[in-house]
Structures are given as C-alpha cells and as structure tokens.
Amino acid sequence: MRKTLLLLTLLLIPLQAATQEAPLSPRVPWTDTIPGKEGTYYFYRGLDFGSQALISPTRLILNGGFGIMQVENRHNRPLDIMYGRGMRNVGKNLLNPGWSIGVNGFWDFLTREVIPISVNSGKAQYWPNYMNHLIGGGMSYRMMEEYYRFHEIPHSKWAAGATILAYHFLNEVVENDVLDGPTTDPVADFWLFNPAGVILFSNDRIARFFSETLHMADWSYQPVYIPNTQELHNNGQNYAVKYHLNQEGSKSLFYHWGTHAELGLSFTARDGRCISLGLGLVAKNLLEVDEISKTLDLAVSGGLFYDRDNSLLASLLYAKTKDYRYRLNLYPGLVKLGPLKPGFFMALNQDHRITYGVSFACVPLLPIGIGGKPIAEN
C-alpha cells in the first residue's frame, strides 16, 4: 500500500507542475473561422500544443483501429493479430448481413445493437455504437475534413471519408482477430452508425452544437511501441464534452469517454486554462454473450484533466484494471527541448510495474512514440 501511494505521489508531481506552466500563446476568442483558411472549423484549430497538436490521420487510425487492445483479456501485440482472417470474416459479415442477423433474429439485433431499451450490459451493445461510432466517429470525420482543408489537401471530404473508413475497418478486423463465423457487431457499425455519424456531422448546425454548446474535443492518448515486448501501449480514441453551467463558462458539466467513461465537473479560468475531474467506469474485459455477440464488463475509474482552450495538456487516470491502474499523459507543449515538444506517458499496473514512453508532435504524421517496460519474471 505504501509503495502504491509513493508511486502515485511521483505521478502527481509532473501533473502539478503542468498546471503552473507559462501561457503558450495569447488566448484568442472563440470563432468558427480561422484567418486565411476557407470554411468553418469546429473541431480542428491547428493549435501547436496539447492534444490538438497530435491530430493527424495516421494517429486517428492507430488510436481507433487498435483501441480494443486496451481491454485486459486481449493481447496488445499488433504483429500477432490475424489480419487476413479478420478481413475475410468482417468482409463476409458485411456482405451478408442477413447471415449473422439471422442467427438470433432481427428483433434481437435491433434490441442489442440499435434500440436503447436495455440497461443489461449483455444486451447494451448499442451504447458504444451511439457514443463511439455515431457521435465519436461522426465528430472524427468532421475533424479530419477540417484537418485536410486546413492543410490544403484537395478533396478534403473524400480524404476524411477514406480515413474514417480505414479507421473503422481496422477496428473491426483487430476486434475480430481469430473469429471465423457470424457476428453482428460490424454489421451495425458499418451499415448504420458509421454512415449516420458522417451524415450527422456534415450538417453545420449539428457540428456547431457539439462544438460551441457541448465544446466537444478529441482527447485521445499518445500511443507508444515497446520494442522489447513488441507491445502497443497507451492507445485509444477518447472524447470530451463540457456543458457550461453558468454564463461565464467557468463551471461546466464534464463527460469524458472512449473505453473509459467519466462524468464530473470542469472549472475554467479566464485565460482558458481548465481543470476537470470525473468518476465513472472503464471497459475491463471483452466477453462473449453468445456465438454472435460480445459485450464488455466494467471496472471503476476516475480522472483528473488539465487543458487549455480545450486542448488537453495533461491527464491522470485511475482504473481498477491490470495494465493501467494509474495512467499519466503529459501532452506536447508542457515541456520544450529546443524545437522539440515531446509528450510523455507513464503507467503503473496492478503489480506496481511502470510502463513509460515519449512521443514527438514535431515529427509530421508520426503517430507513435517509443517506450519501455520491465519484462515480468516467470
């Protein structure tokens, strides 16, 4: 117990220092346009600090595509995934949706995957479909469209659509892995929620609501590769929303989700610095409900977050899970090494072993950092 408290204190030291860093740039009043850039910008602002500095198509695909590796009973070695089998099985289910839906019937498919009428986790696969595919995926599409437009990439909508397609297809392939048979999960995601999210966030009024009323932002992790174990760590696509509780926006209802889900409060200063804290649940294991359906069991989680202008600068998460009992992320801009703006990651598992990593936002489109961890003794 003493060792855990000591290590937790060590993790909190850099987070405390992070909240005392000097302003990175003068705060600019919010507007949905960017000088010199065409069109509106709701989710990508081109900021050079925090989570905004890490936004890129390659990082989105990596964080989202391998997100299922965060749960305890799935390995996190990308080289061991059976991509060929996964692509064949996902493709078979997508091209023949009646095959998988017919196993338990259309009504079972609707009540598990589409209609939110059950709070039983075994029958509530609709929750990640709405939150991660409809809302999260839709926002990610709009964010990528703005990213490509900001960087003057032609056909930004087509480029964003291709990026989201790659992200979601890889996600289904990695989740499928060794499975060879019917499964309804990719059917609901690909034919219903993913396209619905793109359509939803293509509407400026919807995008403006999520951006200016809910202040939605991408607060994804900083993935790192561990050479000595060939593991991918600290990956995952996360989102945050804040609904202001007063006119000044100094107090807000806060919700953070991805594989975590924390509900709490945010407190924002006039210069845009914000502290958020929340409690909730985290996905722990991927479980088979029956031969075609899967669900997640949950564990208690909590989080402390520090952002500036809605760009995440530091986060400390607690979860009652095996690999990430405590997880600290310090994003680019808190520490500067000459022209470099490194990001740092550190995690403490249930056996008090530390995993760590560093990444560099200054390297264009490089979605992954490098890290290390001790190899467990047999």
Image: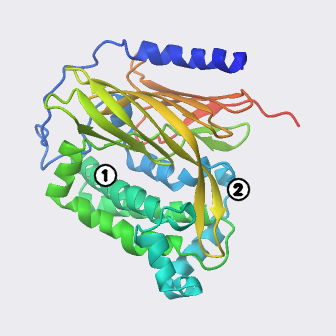
Residue drawn at the location 63% of the way across and 58% of the way down: 286
The type of colouring in the image is rainbow
Q: Which mark is residue 351?
A: none
The residue that label 1 is drawn on is: 144
User: What residue is shown with label 2?
Assistant: 80
Q: Residue 150's quadrant in the figure?
A: top left
The total number of labels drawn is 2
Q: Could you say whether the residue bearing mark 2 is in a helix, strand or loop?
A: helix
- Amino acid beneath label 1: Met
Q: Alpha-carbon neighbours of circle 2 within 10 Å: few (<14), some, or many (≥20)? A: few
Task: Measure the C-alpha gap from mark 2 to mark 1.
Answer: 29 Å
Q: Who is closer to the viewer here, 70 or 151? A: 70
Query: Looking at the image, which is closer to me, 21 or 131?
Result: 131
**Residue 226, position in %: x, y?**
66, 37
Q: Say if residue 155 shows up in the picture.
A: no
Pick whichever of labels 2 and 1 is earlier in the sequence: 2
CA neighbours of label 1 inside 10 A, class few (<14), some (14 to 19), many (20+): many
Q: In which quarter of the image is the N terminus?
A: top right
Determine the image quadrant of residue 54: top left
Which type of secondary structure does the marked residue at label 1 adopt?
helix
- The three-letter amino acid code for the residue at tag 2 is Asp
Name which residue lies at 48% across and 85% down. Answer: 106
Q: Is residue 156 left or right of residue 285?
A: left
